[in-house]
Image (cartoon, rainbow, N blue to C red):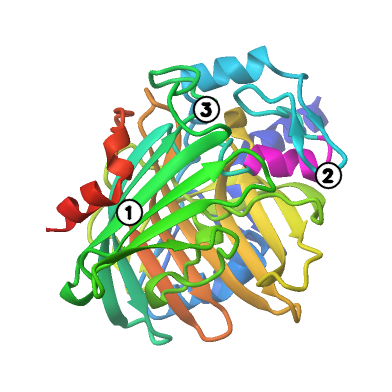
Amino acid sequence: MRKHIVMLFIFMAIPVLIWGKGDKIKIGTIITNQNYKQYIPAIKSMLPEGSHYWIINGIKKGWITIPLVQREKNYPAPPGFAAATKKYAGVCKIGQNNELIGHVAGIPFPDPKNGIELAWNCYSEIRRQCIEDDEFSSPFLLIDKNGDLEREFNMLLWKKKWTKRTDIEPIPQIPAGRKGLTSKESFVINEPFDVKGFAQVRIRYEALEKFDEVYSYIPAIRRIRRLTGSDLTDPLLGSDQMMDDFELWRQKITPKMTFKFSGVKEYLVPRTYTKKPPQPFIRHNLFQAEWETRDLYKLEVIMNDPDYAYSRRVIYASPENNTYCLYYGENYDQKGRLWRGDVLLVQATNPAVGARLWYGTLKVDHLTQHSTVMDMYPSLKGMPVSQNNFTIKYLITKAR
């Protein structure tokens, strides 16, 4: 009887402790620059490889603290998306070239059995980390290796899914549009003055072999230029962010890729907010947020392509309620060195809409220690975005 009582006590204690190499962090602990050394082993065991230095360095310098709070309840997927996942479970298959066959809507593999199934769950046009009609504004902060601001841009962005719509009318797709179109995205820079008016429209297609259509307005020459849709690895406006890294992983799945599914593990993550986080939010190149623990899948994406910028990616995704929101990413160059990565993703949600969106994201260059911070202000209402938002003419008016 005594043995059973002891075991029951142990199981009851598990949710309020985080274990790491013999150390523990209790719920309610605030890790600061005064006490962080005793928690370093636990922090390292509960964060991905590419995040150790940045988080510990920020605590050491007093930029941020880590308040550990009780894990929030699992946030729901959007109602229509959850219904579609249940309705179409079991109908999807993987083709011989890694293509997804039979997908209608929702998460294609609610119980992924291997790396390629997990990869499709995390694919940017499928997962629910972006609602079907999305808009946000964000400063684009370029931070030097000392954590000081080099330069700041301000961006307005819109995205609209054309197919696989489940929660915002029209459902299931927008009738008008090019054949095979999956989404459109546009953004414009409205400050500072020297790049004000730089705008871009991107059109994405479902076929993996079909490149994006990309059009940019360059204010310095007052001309619209069509850019190559196959090269998505050039950094945007001198930052550490490239288009294939948008939403942490936007790159299309290719026949050359191979995947490794490394199972699930409990990690430290910033909590998800239902309203704007406490201010000041940005501290140098980090965010002051409350932290909790979440179970995340670890997925390795091996490119097998010597001409691509990265040799492999490592992605950390939350499987809860089949939303597959991404928290961390690590990208390795062709020499196998850890190069760029997403270290800290602070998310927000409106429970009525379901999808978790980013409030803050940190993109870092591990080789130069340069970083780019985006402090985003997403729309959580799930309101339709006009199709007119995806024209250069409209974007120019938003920059005036």
Q: Secondary structure at mark 1?
A: strand
Crowding near the residue tagged with mark 3, few <14, some 14–19, many ≥20 C-alpha atoms within 10 Å? many
> Is residue 70 among what the camera can see?
yes
Of the residues shown, which amino acid type is indicated by label 1?
Phe
Residue numbers of the magenta segment? 113-122
Q: Percent position (x, y) of residue 302?
A: 78, 61
> Is residue 380 among what the camera can see?
no
Identify residue for label 2: 97
Magenta stretch contains residue 116: yes
Q: Percent position (x, y) of residue 19?
A: 66, 55
Q: Quadrant of the N terminus?
A: top right
Identify residue for label 3: 163
- Label at residue 218: none
Q: How many marks?
A: 3
Report the front residue among 294 and 394.
394
Toward the right, the furthest residue is 96
User: Is the Cβ of the residue at disc 3 closer than 8 Å to that at disc 2?
Assistant: no
Magenta stretch contains residue 54: no
Q: Secondary structure at mark 3?
A: loop
Of the residues shown, which amino acid type is indicated by label 2?
Asn
Dominant SS type (magenta): helix
Q: Percent position (x, y) of residue 305?
A: 78, 67
Label 1 vs label 3: CA separation? 21 Å
Residue shown at the point (64%, 68%) measured from the top left? 331
Question: In terms of image quadrants, where is residue 384?
Answer: top left
Identify residue for label 1: 187
